[in-house]
Image: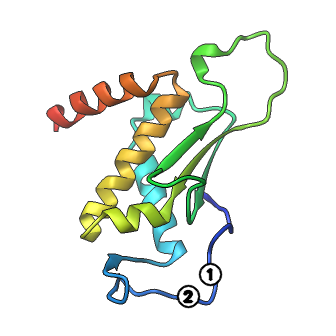
Amino acid sequence: MACRGEVGRDPRRRPGPFDRQYHQLSMGPEEFDVLVERAFKKIPRRFRRRLANVVLVVEQEPPRPNLLGLYQGRPLTHRSVSEGFALPDKITIYQGPHERTARTSSQLEQLVEETVWHEIAHYFGLDEREVRRAEIRRRHLR
């Protein structure tokens, strides 16, 4: 499901589950891809069915600091049935910031889930303020 970008990744580095040298949670790219795929599968089916012409990509580092994920494209609410062919929208999840933010593997998994939800909400047309409000409602439902 997830496609991995190679920008910024040192292929020689094979970190363990907890990289003590940097005091941060760290895992291999394949393990992180599995977390992203699991997070995507937790999105309710009624939303996943409506995702069209969108690709989910994993990259090591973001283009600017403190960015966990990024939606690039035209939100569903701004599209028309009369539109022709378009390149896919892109949702990018950044591994490095997630690992630096999380302190445990369960916290990392939760953070990835929240980021995937957040970026998919942008695909459905929610702006940043609306996404934040929806995240608060979602936390209260748990």
Q: How many marks?
A: 2
Tell whether label 1 touches label 2 (CB within 8 Å): yes
Instruction: Give residue 8's position: percent from left, percent from top.
Output: 64, 70
In this rendering, the answer to whether 31 lies above or below 41 is below
Which residue is pictured at 66% across the width and 25% down the height? 74
Quadrant in which residue 22 is drawn = bottom left
Residue tagged 1? 10
Which residue is pictured at 47% across the width and 68% down the height? 32
Q: Please, what is the three-letter code of the amino acid marked with disc 2?
A: Arg
- Which residue appears farthest toward the front when viewing the image? 65
Instruction: Give residue 14's position: percent from left, percent from top.
Output: 52, 88
Which residue is pictured at 37% across the width and 22% down the height? 130
Q: Is residue 140 visible?
A: yes
Task: For label 2, count other residues whose C-alpha is less than 10 Å away and answer few (under 14), some (14-19) or many (20+).
Answer: few
CA gap, disc 2 and disc 1: 6 Å
Quadrant occupied by the N terminus: bottom right
* Mark 2 residue element: loop
Residue tagged 2? 13
Q: Nearer the viewer, residue 64 or 130?
A: 64
- Which residue appears farthest toward the right when viewing the image? 84
Which residue is pictured at 33% across the width and 60% down the height? 109
Quadrant occupied by the C terminus: top left
In this rendering, the answer to whether 43 lies above or below 49 is below
Q: Please, what is the three-letter code of the amino acid marked with disc 1?
A: Asp
In this rendering, the answer to whether 129 lies above or below 72 is above
Instruction: Give residue 133's position: percent from left, percent from top.
Output: 29, 25
